[in-house]
Amino acid sequence: MSPPAVTEPSHVVLNEVVRRYEGPPAIHALGSIDLVLRRGEFFSVVGPSGCGKSTLLDVLCGLVRPTSGSVQFEGRELRGEVPDGIGVVFQEDSSMPWLSVRQNVAFGLRTSELSQKEITERVDHAVSFMGLAQFSGHYPAQLSGGMRQRVCIARTLVLRPRLILLDEPFGALDQQTRLLMGDELLRLWRETGATVMLITHALDEAAMLSDRVGVMSARPGRFIDMVETGWPRDRDSRIVSDATFGTVTARLWSSLRAESLKTMGRAA
Amino acid sequence: MSDISLENALSTPTSRRRIRAFDAVVMTLLMLALWQAIGSWTKGVAVSPPLQTFVYLFGLLRTGMFWDHAAATLAAFLLAFGLSALIGLALGLIFGIRRFAGEVAEPMLAGFYTIPKVTLYPVVLLVFGLGMSAKVAFGVMHGLVPMTLFTLGAVRNLPPVLIRTAKVLRLSPGRTMLWILVPACLPDIVNGLRISFSLSLLGVLIGEMFSSQRGLGFLLVNGMAQHNVPLSTAVVTVIVVVAIAANTLMLRVGGRTARRPNP
C-alpha cells in the first residue's frame, strides 16, 4: 500500500449543504455547511449531542441526499449513492455474527472483480494489520467490543478506500482501548494515505488524532470553529503529553461549551 | 464471551456431559413411571401401560396397514409443512420489509393465531371436501401463521446498521437479501420452522381424526372407537417419539445458528 502523492488540495467539497427531515415534527438537522476536505488530511468533527454529526457523515458518503446544496467527491457530485472509493465505519458493531473474522473482512470484496489471489492477499494484510491474525477463525460473539470494531475497520481497509469516514467508532470502548485504537487508526491513515474524517464526541480524541478539527453548533449543525492542530504526520497517542495538546483541547472546549449548554436548555 | 451459569460454575465440562446424560435418563424413567401409574390407575381402560404398548407396537410396525396409514400422514404433513414454511417465509419477508403492510397484517395474524382452528374445520371441509386437500389445508392453517410471525419479527429486528453496511458496500437489493437479511434472520427462521413443524403436524392429525379414513390420526380415533386401547396408545407413542426427535434435531440446528450472534 503506497500512499498517493499529496498533490490535489480538495478531495471532498460540501457547498451550502442543508439537510431537513419532513415532519411531524419537521427537523432542520444540518446546515448550511461549507467544507473542503484536503486530500490525505485527518479531519475530525466534534459537536454537542444531536447536532447533526452523523447526518453530516451520511450526506458526505452519499447515504442521504442533502435537501439543498451539493457534495463533490473527487470532483464528481454525489447523487444519493455511495461512490466507489469511500469506506465507512459505523459507531454500532456492524460485524456479521454468522461469519468468522476472516469471512467478515473478506465480505467487503465479495462483489469485487479481483482475482482470488489478490483477495487473499488483501484480506491477509488487513487481518494482520489490525492484529486479528490469531482470531481469524473466531466469530464476533467470541470477541471483545474493541476487536469487533477492528474487524469492521479491516473490512473497510480491504476496499482500499481513498476516503475513510468513521462515525464514533470507539464510542463504546474504554479509555485505554480508545488510545490504542487511536494509534492503530493513525498508522492506518499514514500507510494508506487516505483522507480520514472522524466523528467523535471526545475532544481529547479529536485533538490527538487530527490535523484539523471542526466544531459544530447545536442543531441545526453548522461549523462554528476550525482548529488546526499542527501535529507532525508521524504522531501517536503520546502526543497527549505535549504542552500544546492542552491548548488545543482548551480551544475546542471553549468553542463547544456554549453549544453544549444550549442542547441542555441552559444559557452560556 | 464466556458462558457463565450456575450449572457451569458447579461442574467441569466432563462432569457436565455426565450430568446431562444422567438427567435425560432420569427424566425418561420418570415419564415411563408416570405412564405406568396412569395405565395401572385406569386399569388399561384409557391408556395401556408401557410394556404392553411396546409389545403391541412391535407387532403393529410389522403390518402393512400401519405403514399405509403412516405414509398417508407423512405425505399430508410434508405438503402442509412445506407450504407453511415457504409461504410463511415469503409473507414474513414481505411484511417485514414493507413496514406498513406488516403493521396491518401482524395484529390480524396474531388474532388468527389465538383462534382454536378446530372451530373453522367445518368451513375447511366445505371448501376442500373430504380427503387429502382438507388435511393439508388444515395443517397449513396451523403452521403458516407462526412461520410468518417469526420471520416478520426477525426482519423487523434486523440491526439497521447491517442495512447501512450493505448500502455502503453498494450491494444490490438481491444480494442484500441473500447475503445479509437471510443469514441474519436464520436463528429466528429456524425457530419458526420448529413451531411450524409441530403445529402443521397437529393440524394434519386433527384433520385425519375428524374427516379421513387414512392416516395415523384416523388410526388413533379408530382405535378409540373400537376401544382398542393398546392401538391408540401405540399410535400416540409413535407420534410423540417422531415429534420429539424432530424437535430435538431442529433445536440443535437452531442452537448452532443462535450461538453465533453477538451476546
Image: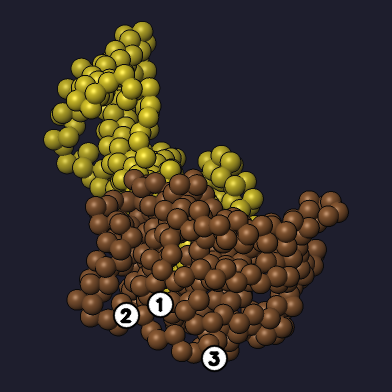
The residue beneath circle 2 is A2
The furthest residue to the right: A267
The residue beneath circle 3 is A76
Callout count = 3
Q: CA distance from mark 1 to mark 2?
A: 8 Å
Say which amino acid is labelled 3: Arg
Report the side of B83 relative to A253 (left or right). Answer: left
Say which amino acid is labelled 2: Ser
* Marks 2 and 3 belong to one chain: yes
- Report in which chain the residue with disc 3 lies: A
Mark 2 or mark 3: name the one nearer the start of the chain: 2
- The chain shown in brown is which? A
- Asked whether disc 1 touches disc 2, contact meaning CB atoms under 8 Å apart, the reply is yes
Mark 1 or mark 2: name the one nearer the start of the chain: 2
Report the side of B151 relative to B48 (left or right). Answer: right
- The chain shown in yellow is which? B
The furthest residue to the bottom: A75
Residue A193 disc label: 1
Q: Residue drawn 62% across and 46% down?
A: B111
